[in-house]
Image (spheres, rainbow, N blue to C red):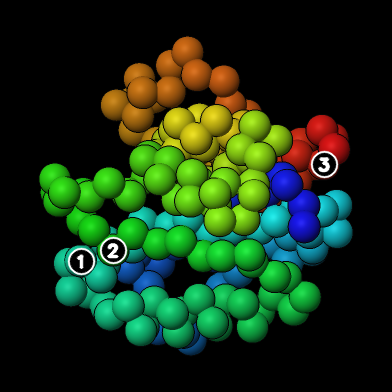
Amino acid sequence: MANHAVFFDRDGTLIIDKHYISKPEDVELLPGVTENLLKLQKAGFQLFIVSNQSGIGRGFFTEDQMHEVNDRMLSLMPGVKFTWMYFCPDTPENPQSNSRKPSPKFLFQAEQNFLVNLKKSWFVGDKDIDVLCGINGGCQSILLDGKYSSEAHKALQGKKYSTVKTIAEAAAIILKGV
């Protein structure tokens, strides 16, 4: 098995962010997702999802509903295989949470459980917390279609990461380093 990986946020990175999506029929892939994930997979990258799912903690949907949404997403990506999908159901207000991004907890679990070399790996997401999660875990990070507040911009100052508009651009950067 490959020792390098690409970690993806889910909402806003792989599927259109519909704010607490809970119905499988609402899942829509972002353009280019399937073909570019297949390219990364073919190049030997393990694929992972790392997603904050605070809608569970807020009672907007259940864990089962989240899995149904994930199953629908996977059905729209024939041939794409994720090694694992990590999710944190905690709300941002939960002081006990140690797995919400930007925490790299799930990256360290992937390193241990799937022999991922984090230094040869990437994190792709559409928010500052995704970039920071990757950086905190020792990965290279890519901000997709840069959506972040001025507060987040401060958190990213001095950090090394790439910014792209599309998943195809992110895949091209990642593949250039193989």
Tell whether label 1 touches label 2 (CB within 8 Å). Answer: yes
Q: Earlier in the sequence, mark 3 or mark 1?
A: 1
Q: Which residue is mark 1?
A: 57
Within 10 Å of the Cα at label 2, are there few (<14), some (14-19), or many (20+) other Cα atoms? many
Q: Is residue 43 above or below residue 83?
A: above
Q: Is residue 32 visible?
A: no
Point 48% across, 55% down: residue:
50
Q: CA distance from mark 3 to mark 1?
A: 36 Å
Disc 1 residue type (three-letter): Gly
Residue 96 position, x and y percent, is: 16, 49
Residue 144 position, x and y percent, is: 57, 43
Between 15 and 131, the residue placed more toward the observer is 131
Question: Which image quarter: residue 79?
Answer: bottom right
Q: Earlier in the sequence, mark 2 or mark 1?
A: 1
Q: Which residue is mark 3?
A: 175
The C terminus lies in quadrant: top right
